[in-house]
């Protein structure tokens, strides 16, 4: 079993009309936690981000392509559920996944330069089929590949080099001790980063680590 991590870069104008209107809000999406093509040819999307929540609500409420939506949170961080009409590109991507033997290791993450980072699990043959059928309007770059090893090592491998540096420093300084022995400012001084940048890295690190955990439903 192997994995391949790719970054997809849609055209600057986005992949559909709704995408273009949302891009104009300047939102910062962090990750897509779930995406499904439904039998009625709509797409259900559960995503995480931050930015102009009221602007996002306005765009979604005014769009004829949105059938239902719900947003929890504020400008500092929100989760959104939307069900919208499938466009040709999304339909191609989702139907291609149904017809192939590879799996997507959720979440799909947004990169700082406007791409979508996705990790696929499967065989080399499955990856060859996937990479040979790149849809028009999307540029796909292979970031890394190798044997798939579940567990903490695999989760850490999904972090960027700078995120791993921030995580190591945070652990060394006792940030994750109870009670905490370090602040964002102390981590920033040790890594030569701005305090706000450290906070952003830690949020992304924690989202990546927590999303890899499979927690069963609590018993009442």
Image: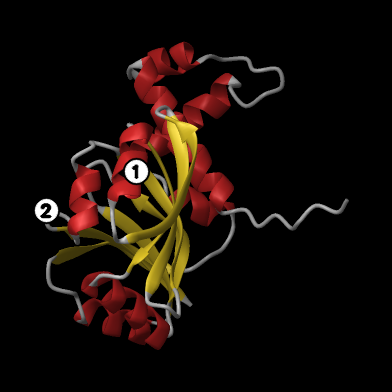
Q: Is residue 70 above or below residue 95?
A: above
Quick check: 176 above or below 27? above
Q: Earlier in the sequence, mark 2 or mark 1?
A: 2
Residue 19 location, x and y as percent? 23, 53
Decide which of 49, 139 is in the foreground and name it.
49
Q: What kind of element bears circle 2?
A: loop
Determine the secondary structure under disc 1: strand
Residue placed under numbered mark 1 in the picture: 29
Foreground of the two, 152 or 83: 83
Q: Residue furthest right?
A: 220
Residue at image position (27%, 78%) is 92
Residue 65 can be seen in this image: yes
Picture quadrant of residue 216: bottom right
Identify the image's colour scheme: rainbow, by chain, secondary structure or one colour. Answer: secondary structure
Label at residue 13: 2
Within 10 Å of disc 1 (Cα), the crowding (few <14, some 14-19, many 20+) is many
At 67% from the left and 24% from the top, the residue drawn is 177
67 vs 112, nearest the viewer: 67
What x and y, as percent, mark residue 90?
A: 28, 70
Q: Is residue 68 left or right of residue 117?
A: right
- Calculate the distance from the C-alpha at mark 2 to the C-alpha at mark 1: 16 Å
- Examine the image and state in which quarter residue 35 appears: bottom left
How many numbered markers are drawn?
A: 2
Q: Is residue 100 visible?
A: no
- Viewer-closest of 121 and 110: 110
């Amino acid at each position: 079993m192997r994995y391949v991590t790719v970054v997809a870069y849609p055209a600057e104008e986005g992949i559909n009309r709704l995408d273009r209107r949302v891009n104009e809000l300047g939102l910062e999406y962090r990750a897509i936690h779930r995406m499904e093509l439904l039998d009625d040819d709509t797409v259900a999307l559960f995503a995480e981000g931050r930015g102009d929540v009221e602007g996002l609500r306005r765009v979604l409420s005014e769009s004829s392509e949105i059938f239902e939506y719900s947003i929890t949170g504020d400008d500092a961080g929100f989760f959104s559920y939307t069900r919208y009409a499938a466009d040709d590109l999304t339909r191609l991507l989702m139907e291609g996944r149904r017809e192939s033997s590879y799996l997507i290791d959720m979440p799909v993450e947004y990169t700082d330069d406007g791409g979508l980072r996705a990790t696929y699990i499967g065989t080399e043959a499955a990856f060859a089929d996937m990479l040979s059928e790149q849809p028009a309007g999307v540029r796909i770059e292979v970031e890394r590949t190798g044997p798939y090893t579940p567990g903490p090592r695999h989760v850490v491998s999904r972090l960027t080099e700078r995120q791993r540096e921030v995580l190591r420093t945070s652990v060394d300084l006792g940030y994750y001790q109870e009670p905490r022995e370090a602040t964002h400012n102390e981590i920033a001084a040790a890594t030569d980063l701005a305090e706000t940048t450290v906070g952003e890295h830690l949020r992304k690190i924690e989202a990546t680590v927590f999303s890899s955990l499979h927690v069963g439903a609590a018993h009442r």
